[in-house]
Amino acid sequence: MATATRDLIHEAPSKLAMAAELPRAAWTLGTLAFSRAMLMQAPKGDGRPVLLLPGLFTSDASNVVLKRYLETLGYRAFGWELGHNFSLRTIGADGERLRARIIAVSEQAGGGAVTLVGVSLGGVMARFAAQRWPDLVREVITVSAPFAGSPRATNLWRTYQWLTGERIDSADAQALLAECAAPLPVPATAIWSRSDGFVNGMICHDPDDATCRCIHIDSSHMGVQLKPEVMRAVAGVLGGE
């Protein structure tokens, strides 16, 4: 049974689940208009700086709705301002561009550590930053971020390799994933979905890591950061619920 479970964990979602991604994302977008009352029940923000990291091949535009929501609650929310997320070449080989952005956000907010909220690949990068510079990071919240298992448990790894030129099975990539998967030195929360059509949800959280809170929300991968329940969960974590 244990072997069968491990094999299942490392399988990519079905082609049917992947095909359903676009219509599910459209439905998610349509539910936003009817969710304001639920969203505004979240705890009020305390003005802390929150840096939003976008997913693979996307930019700050993908996080505009979440950013405005957190600002409405009372947080100082920032985009990463590094353009489209094309993996390590976007943040620098050693993450120096991401580190510089975190420092800039901290300074703009008056100092102190910054909370990182990362969607998909942005969540992996958020964990990378927390491991490398824990003095700069207050907390990490990942949303559908595949940090806890094989990259082959996704329907995007071939596209990722083709567009980035990076091999997921290289020694450097494996070392980086191991680093990101290790327990973080700061508070961490992983929001994930069993019905994710792009990424096996079981690699988006680690139930054996007692230091990382896990929150399951049924969602597609596309537009997951627009799902009202996900936005409310992020606000709840920030508010100490």
Image (cartoon, rainbow, N blue to C red):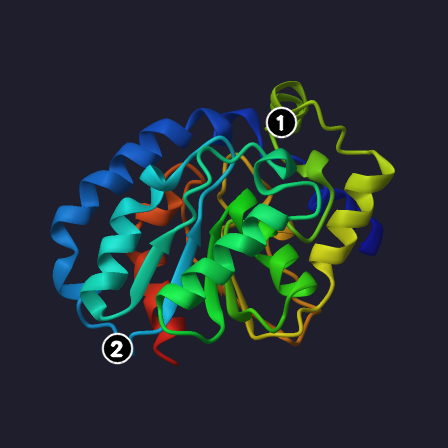
Give SS at disc 2: loop
Label 1 Cα crowd, 10 Å radius (few <14 / some 14-19 / many 20+): some
The answer to whether residue 5 is visible is no
Identify which residue, 103 or 39, lies in the foreground. 103
Which residue is at a point 17% across and 56% down the rendered structure image?
A: 35
Residue position marked by numbered label 1 in the rendering: 160
Residue 157, how many percent across, how many down?
Answer: 65, 29
Where 3 sits versus 17, above or below? below
Residue 148, how many percent across, how many down?
Answer: 69, 53
Identify which residue, 193 or 33, lies in the foreground. 33
Residue 63, how many percent across, how many down?
Answer: 34, 46
The answer to whether residue 158 is visible is yes
Location of the N terminus (image quadrant): bottom right
Pointers 1 and 2 in contact (C-beta within 8 Å)? no
Residue type at tag 1: Tyr
Residue position marked by numbered label 2 in the rendering: 43
Where 1 sits versus 26, above or below? below
